Image (cartoon, helix red, strand yellow):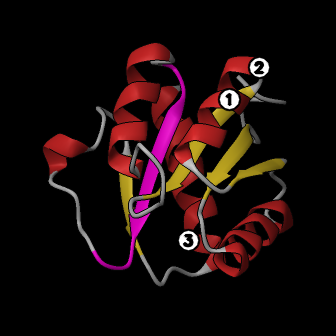
Amino acid sequence: MGRDSKHPLVLVVEDEPFVRMIAAEGLEDAGFQVIEAATADDALKILNARDDVGVLFTDVNMPGSVDGVELARMVHERWPLLRIIITSGRDRPQRSDIPEEGRFVAKPYRPGEVASVISELITDAA
């Protein structure tokens, strides 16, 4: 898992550049290192190339062959220790669509809200 147990590396997957920037800045302000991807395909490339990502924070609605729910499912299957947070302003996934121990955060969210959820996920995993 990323840098340390309290501040894992977070992969933010969001196709809207401004929303992605705000999420990344909020997480960085909370002490997390962040990398960004605009699509699920980009996120999978990053995850295949790196072994230090600890948290996936993904939007549901994105262009490309895979949406955020499917991305979360694929990531959970391949990297089961990676913590997953799904977000959306339009759709609320069913609990069965969210990987075990994953969380959903509705948009609009406060920047500190996502950092708090990550902290809960890390605490729960300990």
Majority secondary structure in the magenta region: strand
The answer, for residue 4, to whether it is visible in the render is yes
Q: Which residue is mark 1?
A: 45
Look at the numbered discs 2 and 1 and tell me whether their residues touch, using CB distance below 8 Å. yes
Q: Give the answer, above or below, for where 117 lies relative to 110.
A: above
- Quadrant for residue 86, please give it: bottom left
Q: Is residue 124 left or right of residue 18?
A: left
Are the residues tagged 3 and 1 within 8 Å (C-beta)? Answer: no
Q: Magenta span covers which residues?
A: 81-90
Label 3 to label 1: alpha-carbon separation: 27 Å
Which residue corresponds to the image point at 51% horizontal and 35% vertical from the top-left? 83
Compared to residue 9, the image places residue 37 above or below, namely below
Q: Is residue 73 above or below residue 20?
A: above
Residue type marked 3? Glu
Nearer-the-camera pick, 54 or 17: 17
Numbered label attached to residue 113: 3
Q: Secondary structure at mark 2?
A: helix
Q: Which mark is residue 65?
A: none
Q: Secondary structure at mark 3?
A: helix
Residue at (59, 49) in percent of width and height: 119
Instruction: Give left or right: position of 124 versus 20.
Output: left
